[in-house]
Amino acid sequence: MEINEDQEIVRKFANFHPSVWKDYFLEYNCDIEALQACTKGVEKLKEVVRNLLKDVQNEPSTQLNLIDALQRLGISYHFEIEIEEAMKHMHDQEIILSFLHDNDLHDLALCFRLLRNQGYKISSDIFREFKDEKGDFKSSLIDDLKGMLSLYEAAHIRIHGEDVLEKALNFTTTNLTSMMTSSPSLSRSPLGRQIQHSLEQPIHKGVPRLEARRYISLYQVNDATWSDTVRTLAKLDFKLVQTLHRQELSDLSRWWKDLDFGKELPFARDKLVECYFWAVGAYFEPTYSIARVFLSKVITLTTIIDDTFDVYGTQEELLLFTDAIQRWDASSIDQLLGQTYKLLYRAILRVYQEMKEMMNKEGCSYQLDYAKEAMKDLVRAYFVEAKWDHEGYVPKLEEYLSNAVVSSACYMIPTTCLVGMGKIMSKEAFEWLRGVPKPLRASSMIGRLMNDVVSHKFEQMRGDVASAVECYMKEYGASEQEACDEINKMVEEAWKDVNEECFTRNTEIPRPLLMRLVNLTRMLHVIYKHEDSFTHSKTRLKENVALLFVDPVDP
Ligand SMILES: CC(C)=CCC/C(C)=C/CC/C(C)=C/COP(=O)(O)OP(=O)(O)O
């Protein structure tokens, strides 16, 4: 921030593109009759699938493939109890060993992935049987495309020290990629299309709702007696959930329009729809509607706060704003310099207050206290960054990261995400998060590092604080490429922490909490894997938003 000769403040300019969606979602009138017909259809088919799950109880391979289809098509949330029971049985009876005995790589790898998904610590040693005497995966496996694909998908849930899965991932990635490039007929086939998609987006790192939407289109009715039924249910259910999402987006658009930030805060990104997409990535299920709407509002406001710190504010203004946030009290509004800050501050307080009133009725108002503390921490971390920026200070990587994991908002968002999820998110659950457990720190590292790799050039151009890339380059005398390669390795290691803590521990932590952490990490992967598609949301992210909230699912 500079002062010019006329003693005026010269503010930075980020040149963000305008809102992609403008008022597109503001009005929404759904066809009530069609909706009622859809609801009836879903209820009927849910019963059919429930019976199917019972019918296949003694056919492990069929049962496994059915559960996989339900999960990938985005409808397993209707059958959580049945699936939990089935997987428990499969685990307790060590059914996986029969797949090993039959040398069936597809079912074996699928069973491994689904058991870990459910939180069972299954040893990856079972895959050693597929190696030759030199310790390499047998070359005969290359002909088993379905098996290789399953192994590739399973290998993404690897944890530290699982060399066999590390090798499996290399082996399957190399061979699947080369098969796809050498065989045009394969790449046109249904299996080829699935392989292509998996190479770009493995299931484990994908955002469930987005992957379900894609899988519904990729899914082929096959000889399994149930495949037509589950596909029809998936399409109807997607339509129904999409209607709810459209309604929520419409309500949020009204809230956003009424705030009228465009005039007073023109420097900031207008990302309401993208922030809602983020929240849907954490939980798409109808039951989490209230939580989802609150989270969307908080992420949208956070984007504005971030831009206020990165682009707009002076040291003095930001210090006062940081201080006011720490007080969290309407009377602090008078200490703020300018309408911009007052408007923003008022909006923040109101969003949390309204949610507190709602949660009071459910006996969960304590959840807001944790959410507020997380927001206070975030704003303090933003201030540290702004100070470093002002002083031109480039910290050592470790010092940078200790603040940057907080300033990524990746501590604040998971905490806020739990508000409104019900009493299962107890004080103990929030305390656990507040203690920054390993998977939270790892998830945050993934977000911060991936974000820095793809956005550091753009942010340096507008004169932002040094990112992990610059810190690494300075500290180790490395080139930009070397820094990015090392940082990408750190991201892979952090994923192993997330996997270890969320999929292989017998813990007291509620599964819905762990799954929110995992889903939010998946979202970071999807948003930042190629570019900063959150900031530059006119291409990839626009397509993804359209897939979930605009395009009808194929007839
Ligand atoms: C940074 C990160 C991993 C964010 C993911 C979590 C998230 C949805 C945060 C809220 C919105 C936000 C501030 C996005 C990052 O902007 P930015 O790219 O300008 O972030 P920066 O200023 O911290 O680099």
Image (cartoon, helix red, strand yellow):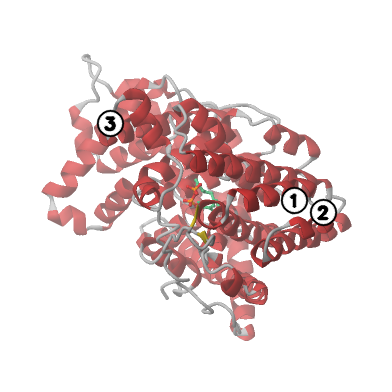
Callout 1 secondary element: helix
The three-letter code of the residue at mark 3 reads Glu
| Residue at the image position 55 percent from the left and 70 percent from the top | 242
Asked whether the residues under the numbered discs 2 and 3 touch, taking CB atoms below 8 Å apart as contact, a structural biologist would say no
- Disc number for residue 553: none
Q: What residue is pinned by disc 1?
A: 324
Tell me what residue is drawn at x 49 percent, y 26 percent: 398
Residue 194 appearing in the image: yes
Mark sitting earlier along the chain (2/1): 1
Label 3 packing within 10 angstroms: few (<14), some (14-19), many (20+): some
User: Disc 2 to disc 3, how far (Cα)?
Assistant: 47 Å
Is disc 3's CB within 8 Å of ligand 1?
A: no
Residue at which label 3 appears: 482
Task: Label 3, secondary structure: give it.
Answer: helix
Q: Is residue 233 above or below residue 421?
A: below
Q: Is residue 190 above or below residue 167?
A: below
